[in-house]
Amino acid sequence: MRPTVLEIGSGTGGVGVALLEMGASAVHGIDLSSASVDVARRRAAAAGFEAQASFEVGEGTQVGDQSVDWVIMDRVLCCDRRAQEMLAAAMKVAARRIALSVPDSRGWRGLLNHPMWAAENVWDRFRGGCRGYVHDLRRIERTLVGGRFRQSGSVHVGLWHVGIYDRV
Ligand SMILES: C[S@@+](CC[C@H](N)C(=O)[O-])C[C@H]1O[C@@H](n2cnc3c(N)ncnc32)[C@H](O)[C@@H]1O
């Protein structure tokens, strides 16, 4: 079955368009940045996916209640202090799967990520960049388990955890 996908924090649409190329039937992306949404729309059009792709400016903690097969959150939970609210929104609409990537807070990766992200936040405060968060991955996974999502796959990409969680 070709899944319908909601991508929270879709950025410039790279992941969404890649999912369409891999067989997703429809992708809807929401992102806080209108500039990114514009790029995502152009990217989807250039790839020939106008009919299957839609991108809009929106808040990831408020995604409505229209059910989709998959919800993707690639490198977005780490951009927002409200990870739990975003997870709750995702769990409400994901009928089958949630996939996410976050900097790993556990083990030796966590030992590196915490000071590295703290240092970057100091730097970003002067530079005017946005704050990043190394959220507690164990808490994220407890929330998913509480919402009846079970991990079906995971991989590390450098210091990042990429996890797939399927509805039980
Ligand atoms: C690091 S980028 C990742 C973009 C894309 N997911 C990717 O992997 O290429 C994070 C994106 O999340 C968006 N974002 C952060 N907080 C958000 C929120 N609360 N609701 C929607 N989008 C958000 C930012 O505007 C930004 O485009």
Image (cartoon, rainbow, N blue to C red):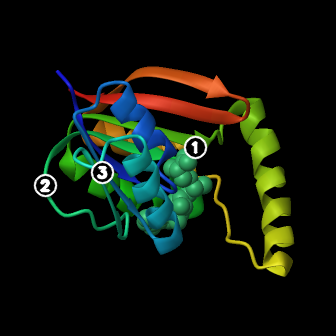
Quarter of the N terminus within the rendering: top left
Q: Which residue is mark 3?
A: 90
At x 19%, y 64%, the residue is 64
Is 120 or 36 nearer to us in this picture? 36
Disc 1 and disc 3 in contact, CB within 8 angstroms: no
Residue 44 in view, yes or no? yes
Image mark for residue 54:
none
Mark 2 against mark 1, which lies toward the viewer? Answer: 2
Name above or below for residue 166 compared with residue 34: above
At x 58%, y 61%, the residue is 79
Residue 113 in percent (x, y) is at: 76, 45
Q: Is residue 17 left or right of residue 108?
A: left
Mark 3 element type: helix
Whether the residue under disc 2 has CB within 8 Å of ligand 1: no
Disc 2 crowd rating (10 Å Cα; few below 14, some 14-19, many 20+) is few
Amino acid type, mark 2: Gln
Q: Which residue is mark 1?
A: 102
Disc 3 crowd rating (10 Å Cα; few below 14, some 14-19, many 20+) is many
Mark 1 element type: strand
Residue 124 in percent (x, y) is at: 80, 71
Q: Which residue is mark 2?
A: 66
> In whole angstroms, how far apart are the C-alphas of marks 2 and 1?
25 Å
Q: Is residue 114 left or right of residue 104?
A: right
Is 135 or 103 nearer to us in this picture? 103
Rendering quarter of residue 110: top right
Whether the residue under disc 1 has CB within 8 Å of ligand 1: no
> In whole angstroms, how far apart are the C-alphas of marks 1 and 3?
15 Å
